[in-house]
Structure formats: structure tokens, C-alpha cells
Amino acid sequence: MLKIKIVPGENIERALKRYKRKVKNTRQLQRIRDNQEFTKKSKMNREKIAKAKYRNEYLKKMEE
């Protein structure tokens, strides 16, 4: 469970923004979505390889 401290007199919108940023940075929502259904290891590996290929091609383009 994520906790944020609210300073007295702090705007609730600001505290909510900090909370949302903390959720995004800890990838908590992504883990919840991943656990909704089982993913085979082979599929995870295929996605990982595809992501690496895409990233490699992108970095090559940026060098040129």
C-alpha cells in the first residue's frame, strides 16, 4: 500500500498528483493488470525479444 504524507494546508489536488506519480513510478497498476490473466513464459519471452528488436532499431535510427 502506498502512503503519502499530506502537509497541513496543502492542496488536495497536489497530494493527489503526488499519489498518481508514485503509483506510476512503482508500476503498481501494471503489476495488477499483469496478474489478471496468466501469461505463458514463451509469450513473455517473445514480447521481450520483440521489444528489444524495436529498441535496437530505434537507437540505430537516432544515431544516423
Image (cartoon, helix red, strand yellow):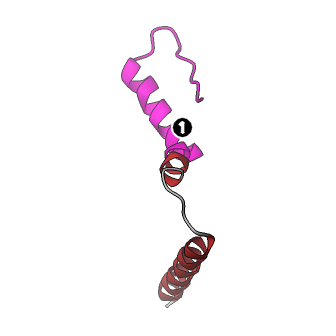
Asked if the magenta segment contains residue 32, the reply would be: no
Q: Measuring 53% from the left and 78% from the top, which residue is drawn there?
A: 55
| Magenta stretch, residue numbers | 1-29
Residue 63 position, x and y percent, is 53, 86
Residue 12's place in the image compared with 51, above or below, is above
- Looking at the picture, tell me which residue is in the foreground, 1 or 7: 1
Residue 62 position, x and y percent, is 49, 83
Residue farthest top in this picture = 8
Asked if the magenta segment contains residue 26, the reply would be: yes
Of the residues shown, which amino acid type is indicated by label 1? Lys
Residue 5 position, x and y percent, is 57, 19
Residue at which label 1 appears: 22
Residue 60 position, x and y percent, is 53, 88
Tell me the quarter of the image containing the N terminus.
Answer: top right
Residue 17's place in the image compared with 51, above or below, is above
Q: What element carries label 1?
A: helix
- Looking at the picture, tell me which residue is in the foreground, 4 or 35: 35
Q: Measuring 48% from the left and 31% from the top, which residue is drawn there?
A: 18
Question: How many discs mark residues in the rendered view?
Answer: 1
Residue 53's place in the image compared with 45, above or below, is below
Q: Measuring 54% from the left and 64% from the top, which residue is drawn there?
A: 39
- Looking at the picture, tell me which residue is in the foreground, 32 or 37: 37
Q: Measuring 42% from the left and 27% from the top, which residue is drawn there?
A: 16
